[in-house]
Each structure stands twice: as structure tokens, then as C-alpha cells.
Amino acid sequence: MKKVFFLAGLIMLVISCQQTDTPRPRGYFRIALPEKAYVDFDTLYPYSFQYPVYSVFSPDERETAEAFWADILFPDFDGVIHLSYKTIGSREDLEKYLEDARTFVHRHIPKATAIYEETIVHSENNVYGMIFRIMGREAASALQFYATDSTDHFLRGALYFHVPPNNDSLAPVIGFLERDIRHLLSTLEWDASAI
């Protein structure tokens, strides 16, 4: 009887010790997102708005930069919103700037799976524009936008990260910063005296 128990125990031990290797699903690091809070950007620029306290406003100092171009840097996320500003001198200027904004968005088509457009209207501040959400794992810029008063001012922005594009893992940060872009647009005001 001892031999039967010993043999049964040995068989159970051998069967239960067989290891099957199953790969774990790929995961991403947890990203700590700060609390939302904003400060006023109100200088000698022809536009003003509120931007997040966890970002840094920096004038664009590249050689190719034009007057009133700037960056909103997000050091914790290694990201940036590039802002470019143009003065509208004629109806042709406005049409050109609108076409340029669409061209910049459409450059992402090879990597995009979809591009969603949303009209922005804040008539109380004379701000009209669009937000473009560019879907796709390898799209370089997940969010772009423009705002204008249709007569004097045109502001375009694009969100980029200084990491290889992987919008699946960046999705929480992109969603978080999209709310900041929407806040920026809702608080945007024009100042004609600064032109």
C-alpha cells in the first residue's frame, strides 16, 4: 500500500511540476498626471490665454521662427505644443493659412488610421477654429489645431512628444493634454494693439 501511495504521489508531483511558459501581455508604465491648474499668459503678444502650471511658456528662438511664435513645454511628459502666429492681411492670406493648417495635418495620413475634425466656436472672444485628432499608433502629432478671428489673427498649434511615436502608450497623456488645449482655446483672446 505504501508503494501505491508513493507511486501516486510521484506521478502527481511530475504532472504538477510541468511548467508551461505563457508570455505576459505587454504593459506600459503608469503615468502620474498632475492636477489641473492654469496661469494667465498675457504679455506683449497679439494673443493671450491660460496655460497649465505644469508647463513652461517659451518664445520660439529657432532661426526659422517668426514674430510671436512660441512653445508650451511639458517637461514631465517630454512634450511640446508648437504655436505659430500669423497676421491676416487679406482674404487670400486667411485662405493660405487655412490650407497650410490642413496640409500639416494631412502630412500624417501615411501613419494615421483616422483624422477627426472638430469645429471650435467661442464667439464671445471672436475665436473660431478646428481641432484635429490624428489617430494612429505611429502618427508623429496626435493633436493639431488652429484659431482665428477671420480678419486679423491666425494661431496654429501642434502637439509633439520627443519620444518615438507610440500613441497607444501615450494615450493617457494625449487625452490629458487635449483638455489643456481645449482650455487654451476657450480662454484665447486677441490683442490688436500688439501687432
Image (spheres, rainbow, N blue to C red):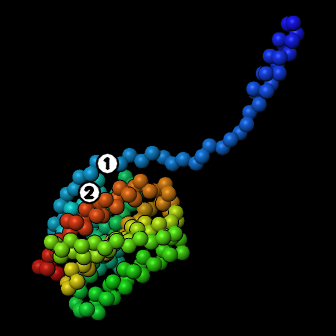
For the question of whether residue 99 can be seen, the reply is yes
Expressed as whole percent of the image width and height from the top left, the position of residue 55 reads: 29, 57
Where does label 1 land, which residue?
34
Where does label 2 land, which residue?
52
Q: Residue at the location (48% across, 60% down)? A: 167
Viewer-side residue, 116 vs 102 = 116
Viewer-side residue, 6 vs 52 = 6
Spatial CA distance of label 1 from label 2 is 10 Å
Q: Residues within 10 Å of mark 2 (few under 14, many from 20)?
A: many
Q: Residue at the location (20% across, 69% down)? A: 188
Q: Residue at the location (24% across, 76% down)? A: 128
Q: Is residue 4 above or below residue 76?
A: above
| 16 lies left or right of 31 | right
For the question of whether residue 45 can be seen, the reply is no
Q: Secondary structure at mark 1?
A: loop
| 189 lies left or right of 79 | left
